Each structure stands twice: as structure tokens, then as C-alpha cells.
């Protein structure tokens, strides 16, 4: 089962998780990060690195965020196809927008 980036990453984008991913399955847009479910190997390395607790294994995604399972798959696929700088493998400056709810 792949992991899923959920609502807590929305407008609160930290990239600590991307650095530890052994298969480099993270993609980003202006708002948040996404995990490509095709590439994720369910290693859980990213989970403890997320300072906003936004990453869950797919079966453990809270029900209020279940739509993020499909969103991650769709956005990761679209961003992967588009190429460019959407594929993120290194730490970047954090983005804390007005809707950021850092814990």
C-alpha cells in the first residue's frame, strides 16, 4: 500500500520527507506535495520526517481526507507527465502560506 499526502500539507509545504525517500516518489505543485502510488514502496521513511503529520499509509488515511488518495494519484501522474521541476528529491525552503496549520 502506498503512502498518501493529506490536507495538513496544503499551503504548508515542507520537503523533509522528499530527502529520505529511497525511490524519489514525491511531486509538488504550488500548494503541496504528492506521492506517486505507482513508485511508493511503502517504506514509511517519510512519515516521521513530516513536521505537519500529513503523510499516512493508504489504509490509515483519516476518513475526512479519503479524497486525497485519488488526488495524490491524479496529481502525481499529471505532474510526472508534465516533467519540469515538479519532481522533488531535495530539501527546499518551506512554504508556509496563510492556511498552514503547522503543529
Image: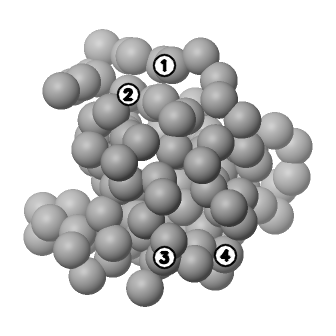
- Name which residue lies at 23% across and 69% down: 61
N-terminal of the two: label 2 or label 1? 2
Q: From where the camera sits, is residue 67 visible?
A: no
Q: Secondary structure at mark 4?
A: loop
- The alpha-carbon separation of the residues under discs 4 and 1 comes to 25 Å
Q: Which mark is residue 95?
A: 1
Q: Is residue 21 left or right of residue 68?
A: right
Which secondary structure, mark 3? loop
Q: Quadrant of the C terminus?
A: top left
| Badge 1 or badge 3: first in the primary sequence | 3
Lateral position of residue 55 relative to residue 103, left or right: right
Tell me whether the residue at label 4 lies in contact with that at label 3, contact meaning CB atoms closer than 8 angstroms: no
Q: Answer few, some or many: residues within 10 Å of disc 3's Cα (few below 14, many 20 plus, some between 14 and 19).
A: some
Distance from the alpha carbon under mark 2 to that under mark 4: 23 Å
**Mark with earlier residue (2, 4):** 2
**Which dot, 4 or 3, sits closer to the camera?**
3
Eye-nearest disc, 2 or 4: 4
Question: For mark 4, what is the residue?
Answer: 39
Q: Say which quarter of the image contains residue 53.
A: top left
| Residue holding disc 3 | 42
Query: Residue 24 appears at what percent x and percent y?
Result: 71, 58
The answer to whether the residue labelled 2 contacts the one labelled 4, judged by CB atoms less than 8 Å apart, is: no
Q: Which mark is residue 24?
A: none
Q: Secondary structure at mark 1?
A: strand
Amino acid at each position: 500500500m502506498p503512502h498518501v499526502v493529506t490536507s495538513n500539507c496544503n499551503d504548508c509545504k515542507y520537503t523533509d520527507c522528499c530527502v529520505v525517500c529511497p525511490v524519489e516518489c514525491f511531486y509538488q505543485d504550488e500548494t503541496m506535495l504528492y506521492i506517486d502510488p505507482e513508485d511508493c514502496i511503502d517504506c514509511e521513511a517519510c512519515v516521521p520526517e513530516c513536521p505537519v503529520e500529513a503523510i499516512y499509509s493508504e489504509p490509515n488515511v483519516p476518513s475526512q481526507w479519503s479524497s486525497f488518495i485519488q488526488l495524490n494519484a491524479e496529481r502525481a501522474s499529471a505532474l510526472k507527465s508534465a516533467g519540469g521541476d515538479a519532481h522533488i528529491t531535495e530539501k527546499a525552503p518551506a512554504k508556509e502560506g496563510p492556511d498552514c496549520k503547522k503543529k
